[in-house]
């Protein structure tokens, strides 16, 4: 039990203030640190570590995420759609073609938002062999990429409130339709995908929509350029066991990819 004066934790031997400083430093050095790993590293209980993280978060030193914490500076900025599209265009095109190749005629697909998902939509629209495909999306740019493929691809826009940063539709009213639908396949992007933290997004409203889409899909695919693999962002979307396949590019960190595969997630590298 913690000392009433807050001087010592009682297991682990370090004064509470010293341990918390070291916990904060450990998190600063890593993109993500889990409660379990911190408890083992400092020889204290997970309850103690959770209390430490809550205190550090309140002090503004770390940001709490599902199962652990990230450094306060990590995952705080959400790039615009245009910035993302300009920085990894070639990689996103390869990922888009690989993911689009998984779509079959007569299927219902949910597509999320973001420049990598837009690359999937662009590749889908270029496929002349598809027929009777229905795509449900909350992305305005994604819908526009698919428009040339109508009527071979039927496009349903989910509705909601427009976010200009990603040209996406979110709550209020962004989830009303999605909660009533099911799909053969869901394809979403992310701001981070890491073995322990799972799938994360830089914006909580976007995370909510992606979570619903993944829940509605029979098969769940994440498309992420290599810079997102091994990273953790602000808002939790889904654990790794909520993802069936990750499509990325050769720039993804080998160790981060190996850790995801150890969790049972299939990872394909598009080139």
Image (cartoon, rainbow, N blue to C red):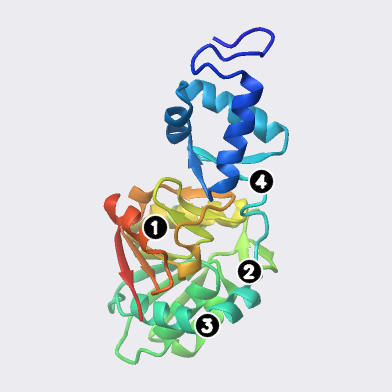
Q: Position of residue 185 (x, y in %)?
A: 34, 65
How far apart are the alpha carbons under marks 1 and 4? 21 Å
N-terminal label among 2 and 1: 2
Is 166 displayed left or right of 249 in the figure?
right
| Comparing labels 3 and 4, the label whose residue is closer to the camera | 4
> Image quadrant of residue 180?
bottom left
Secondary structure under the numbered disc 4 in the rendered image: loop
Q: CA distance from mark 2 to mark 4?
A: 23 Å
Q: Which mark is residue 256?
A: 1
Question: Which numbered disc, 2 or 4, marks the residue closer to the eye?
Answer: 4
Q: Residues within 10 Å of mark 1 (few under 14, many from 20)?
A: some
Find out whether the residues at labels 3 and 1 contact each other: C-beta distance under 8 Å. no
**Residue hosting label 3:** 89
Which residue is depicted at the point 43% across and 86% down? 125
Of the numbered discs in the image, which one, if any, rests on residue 24? none
Q: Is residue 70 visible?
A: no
Judge by depth and name the residue closer to the eye, 137 or 22: 22
The quadrant the C terminus occupies is: bottom left
Sequence-first disc among 2 and 4? 4
Res. 38 in view: yes
Q: Give how far apart the Cα atoms at labels 3 and 1 are.
A: 22 Å
Q: What crowding class fits label 3: few (fewer than 14 Cα within 10 Å), some (14-19), or many (20 or more)? A: some
- Give the residue at mark 2: 166
User: What separation in Å lies between label 3 and label 4 (alpha carbons)?
Assistant: 29 Å
């Amino acid at each position: 039990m913690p000392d009433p004066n807050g001087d010592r934790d009682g297991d682990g031997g370090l004064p509470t203030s010293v341990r918390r400083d070291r916990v904060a430093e450990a998190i600063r050095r890593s993109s993500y640190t889990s409660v379990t790993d911190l408890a083992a590293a400092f020889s204290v209980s997970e309850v103690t570590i959770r209390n430490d993280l809550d205190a550090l978060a309140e002090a503004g030193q770390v940001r709490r995420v599902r199962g652990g914490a990230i450094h306060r500076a990590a995952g705080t900025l959400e790039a615009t759609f245009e910035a993302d599209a300009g920085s990894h265009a070639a990689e996103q095109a390869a990922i888009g073609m690989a993911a689009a190749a998984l779509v079959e005629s007569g299927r219902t697909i949910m597509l999320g938002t973001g420049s990598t998902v837009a690359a999937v939509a662009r590749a889908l629209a270029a496929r002349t062999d598809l027929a009777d495909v229905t795509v449900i999306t909350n992305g305005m740019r994604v819908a526009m990429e698919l428009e040339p493929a109508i009527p071979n691809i039927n496009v349903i826009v989910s509705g909601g409130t427009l976010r200009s940063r990603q040209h996406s539709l979110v709550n209020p009213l962004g989830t009303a339709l999605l909660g009533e639908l099911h799909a053969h396949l869901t394809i979403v992007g992310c701001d981070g995908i890491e073995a322990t933290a799972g799938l994360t997004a830089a914006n909580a409203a976007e995370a909510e929509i992606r979570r619903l889409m993944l829940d509605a899909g029979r098969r769940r695919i994440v498309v992420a350029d290599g810079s997102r693999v091994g990273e953790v962002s602000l808002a939790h979307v889904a654990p790794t066991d909520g993802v069936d396949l990750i499509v990325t590019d050769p720039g993804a960190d080998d160790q981060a990819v190996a850790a995801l595969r150890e969790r049972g997630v299939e990872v394909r590298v598009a080139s």
